[in-house]
Amino acid sequence: PCQCGCPADAAITPDCCSRRRGTGRLTVTVWGGRGWRGDHLSMTDAYVRVTVGAQSARTATAWNQERPRWGARLDMGRVALPPGARLRLEVWDEDNGWDDDLLGVCEVGLEATAATEGDGERAGLCFPGGGHLEFGYRLTCGRALGGSLCHDYVPQPPEGDGGLYRFSRWPPG
């Protein structure tokens, strides 16, 4: 439980408990890959679709590339993080937009990144359809939340001068 007394707002209760427990902000970076063959008569026109729950985003198409480099940062916004939350990455060969070919799929478990982890991005590598996909993600919990899926409450120091707490040490010992 959380109890510290703070001004309530849309995201925090008066007890400093987040109203968004079990959610986090997710950004995925798709760096590049290799090893896919789309159509037999032409080079691969690859793109990557990233999905978490009902939310998805995609990279631009890397036209005629055997070793596509996207360097694309996809902001997935606030995502729900139920137990076992997974990030799904699909590699596609673009044809006409309506008959694209799925080249491979991989899924990885999500885990919140700690502020102490350099730039906060977790590096990832997976092998969809026998190819090699390099990516990274950053999942950050909201205010007063922590844990691998942002389900744990984390005590927060009082805001401003601390009111009654101004002469006390934070965190309490």
Image (cartoon, helix red, strand yellow):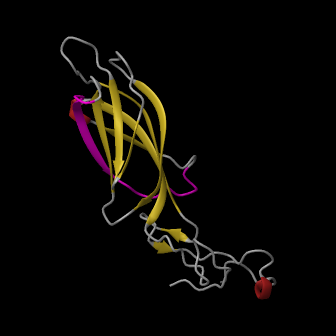
Residue 106 to residue 62: above or below: below
Q: Quadrant of residue 148?
A: bottom left
Tally of numbered tags: 0
- The quadrant of the image that shows the C terminus is bottom right
Report the residue at 44% width, 28% height from top: 70
Left or right, 139 with reference to 51:
right
Left or right, 149 with reference to 98:
right
Q: Is 114 covered by the magenta stretch?
A: yes
Residue 40 to residue 33: above or below: above
Frontmost residue, 129 versus 51: 51
Report the residue at 41% width, 64% height from top: 149
Residue 151 to residue 71: above or below: below
Percent x, y of residue 97? 29, 28
Percent x, y of residue 80? 40, 62
Report the residue at 25% width, 24% height from top: 36
Q: Which residue is situated farthest in the left direction here?
A: 40
Residue 56 to residue 104: above or below: below
Percent x, y of residue 113? 49, 55
Q: Quadrant of residue 40?
A: top left
Frontmost residue, 167 versus 162: 162
Q: Is 51 covered by the magenta stretch?
A: no
Percent x, y of residue 127? 27, 36
Q: Quadrant of residue 130?
A: top left
Report the residue at 35% width, 30% height from top: 47
Which span of residues is magenta-colored? 98-117
Left or right, 37 with reference to 12:
left
Q: Which residue is situated farthest in the top direction here?
A: 41
